[in-house]
Amino acid sequence: MICDTSGIISAHIADQPYNEETLEAMNRADSLILSPISLSEIDQVVSVRNGSWASRRIFEELVEPEYELASFDESDLALALGVMTSNEDLNIGLVDASLVVLAKRYKTNEILTLDQRHFRAIRGLDGRHFKLLPFDLD
């Protein structure tokens, strides 16, 4: 499962919306893939809302073996720019576009996210709709 900023924050800060549901989705996942592009966004959002100590606590958990920090190179950036351009009307940013690229690489359509506005509207590079967790748990 590819992890978006909102999913990581929801899972790691108890008073966030959908905390329990997000944790359940993560516990069911075979893998938890992080985009390196999302790390600064996680840091920024959590530090502003909860303090730098909370951001450090999340990163301490993200270095655990159940998480995989994906690589992201120039060819991935080019694909992400294509996602941003083809979805210009939705104002897709680089973080979300990087998740679309990683979903293709890892051959999954599962995204851990609370961002239904963007991820319900766009499709993966393989043409499939995304399965948004925790909302689409079976």
Image: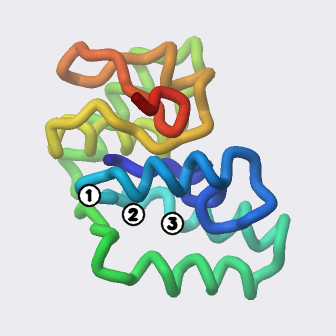
Crowding near pointer 3: few (<14 within 10 Å), some, many (20+)?
some
SS state under label 3 = helix
Where residue 35 appears, as percent x and y from the top left, is 38, 57
Determine which residue is flagged by label 3.
39
Is residue 13 shown left or right of residue 78?
right
> Which of pointers 2 and 1 indicates the residue nearer the eye?
1
Residue 135 is left or right of residue 16, and the answer is left
Total numbered labels: 3
* Residue highlighted by disc 1: 31
Residue drawn at x 26%, y 16% is 128
Callout 3, which amino acid? Leu
Disc 2 marks a residue whose amino acid type is Pro
Colouring style: rainbow
* Residue under label 2: 36
Q: Secondary structure at mark 2?
A: helix
The local crowd at label 2, few if under 14, some if 14 to 19, many if 20 or more residues have their Cα within 10 Å, is some
Residue toward you, 69 or 27: 27
Q: Identify the residue at image location x=15%, y=37%.
A: 107
Query: Which one is in front, 3 or 84?
Result: 3
Q: Can you give x and y, in whole percent of width and height, for residue 3 in the image?
A: 43, 51
Q: Decide: is 2 above or below 131.
A: below
CA gap, disc 2 and disc 3: 6 Å
Q: Secondary structure at mark 1?
A: loop
Q: 75 or 39: nearer the eye?
A: 39
